[in-house]
Image: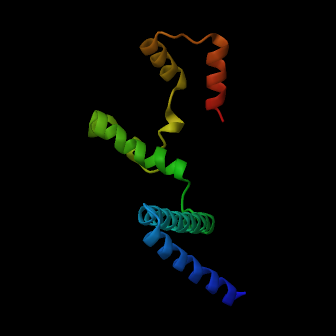
Amino acid sequence: PEAVKAAIESLKGELALIIKASVPGGKWVIDKYSKLKTARAEKMAQKKEIEEMKVDITEKLINTPLDTDPFSIYWRQSMKSLLARKFGKGCLSTTELGSDWSVIDNIDVTVVVKRVESLTGIRLSREGLQKVLSIHQY
């Protein structure tokens, strides 16, 4: 089987040379086909590489334990930095700057909803407000 494949590939090469030499525009067609074949091979190699990267990333995510919940890090660290950048360093008290204090646990959702209502001009019904408040409790 391998010898047959090698013979067929050799014949394809010879056929390409004959077409290039004897058919008007043959060189252009063969060159175009060769470029297409190369591009296709490169695309397949890229797909394979991407799949390997996906597998590698997935394995790393699955096998790497997180020290702390990312959600907690966001509300205990990142959000505090964002608030300080937006409103100045004095916007949070010493207690609020502590690592035990979480922004999300201390948000008054009613105040936030009222502010959104005033900014957008859209008012929630009592039922809608109750649903929003019940979601926050989880």
Q: Position of residue 138 (x, y in %)?
A: 66, 36
Q: Nearer the viewer, residue 27 or 81?
A: 27
Which corner quadrant of the image does residue 25 belong to?
Answer: bottom left
Q: Nearer the viewer, residue 119 or 130?
A: 119
Task: Please give the name of the residue rendered at 45% of the width and 18% of the height, measured from the top-left corner.
Answer: 115
Q: Is residue 31 left or right of residue 135?
A: left
The N terminus lies in quadrant: bottom right
Comparing 91 with 32, the one in front is: 32
Residue 101 % position (x, y) = 47, 44
Residue 86's place in the image compared with 41, above or below, is: above
Identify the residue at image location x=51%, y=37%.
104
How many numbered discs?
0
Q: Is residue 86 left or right of residue 34?
A: left
Tell me where residue 88 sits by quadrant. Answer: top left
Left or right, residue 20 beside residue 15: left
- Left or right: where does residue 68 sit relative to residue 25? right
Q: Quadrant of residue 50?
A: bottom right
